[in-house]
Amino acid sequence: MQKIALITDSTCDITKDLIEKYNIHVIPFRIIYSNREYRDGVDISAEEVYLNLENEVPTTSLPSLLDMENLFDKLEGEGYTHAIAVTVSSGLSGMFNALRLVSLERENIKCHVFDSKTISLAEGGIVLKCAEMLKENKSFEEIIEALPKLRDRMECYMVMATLKYLKKGGRIGKISGTIAEALNLKPVIRVNEEGVYDTHDKVRGRKQSIKRLIEIVSKFEKPGEVYVVHGGAEEEMKFLADQLQALPNVKSVLLGGNTTPVCGVHSGPGLLGFAYLVEE
């Protein structure tokens, strides 16, 4: 009989209550300050990261190999025979390759490591669908067969209140970022099919950027489920969720919390994003 563990990383942005409900095993990224290192979402919260950004913008790194090894040791000790791991996009992080290499060393657990080619609650949405399939007693083989189709049906878009931290982190050119800020331009960012960030559009001002997110969802031809997430912008997230829930093509809206600190380091406060899972 198969005993299947569900693994992901801390960029998935799944709330703690859902992690506990579905017994999801989350491997934390690392947040590194000049004098201390933290485990993402374990030793430090997104709120704490945002509050300290004016003093120091930390760096981020992959989870430690020890954390990965310890997780597999724990799973083996609990009698798991199989594991399904869904990771942040390989186009944005080395997590997929690192976890795959660790899993290959494990002879007692048959593990499938899947590249979500996305991030945040788009990645998390795939994980939650896997969790639902596990609840339905789907087999290891059935779930891994469904994963590519889930990925193909998932869209991810986001906007940010400021480009300041993308510039500091080297995620955007300083000159182009400064010009955009001077013109009050807000890029609407999409995670594309290759699993990397792509500028979908540019609008002027915060209100217009949120309006554009709503417009994007309204134009999906097929009905779908929406997952929304924020970074220090809870009230705006609730407004966005209410607007999306009123759209005829939206079947349901799942409210996330603050995006993981490892994402917050680069986005800064004011991130709003959604994932849209197109109906089959």
Image: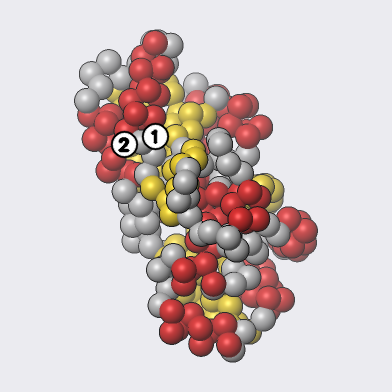
Q: Which residue is mark 2?
A: 99
- Residue 85 is tagged as 1
Which is more foreground, mark 1 or mark 2?
Answer: 2
Residue 5: x %, y % from top left: 43, 24
* Camera-side residue of 235 and 250: 235
Q: CA distance from mark 1 to mark 2?
A: 8 Å
- In the rendered structure, the answer to whether residue 209 lies left or right of residue 81 reads right
Residue 110: x %, y % from top left: 29, 23
Q: Quick check: can you spot residue 1?
A: yes
Q: Hey, what amino acid is under mark 1?
A: Ala
Q: Hey, what amino acid is under mark 2?
A: Leu
Element assignment for label 2:
helix
In the displayed structure, 75 sits above or below 30; it is above
Residue 184: x %, y % from top left: 62, 84
- Residue at image location 36% in from the left, 17% down from the top: 73
Q: Quadrant of the N terminus?
A: top left
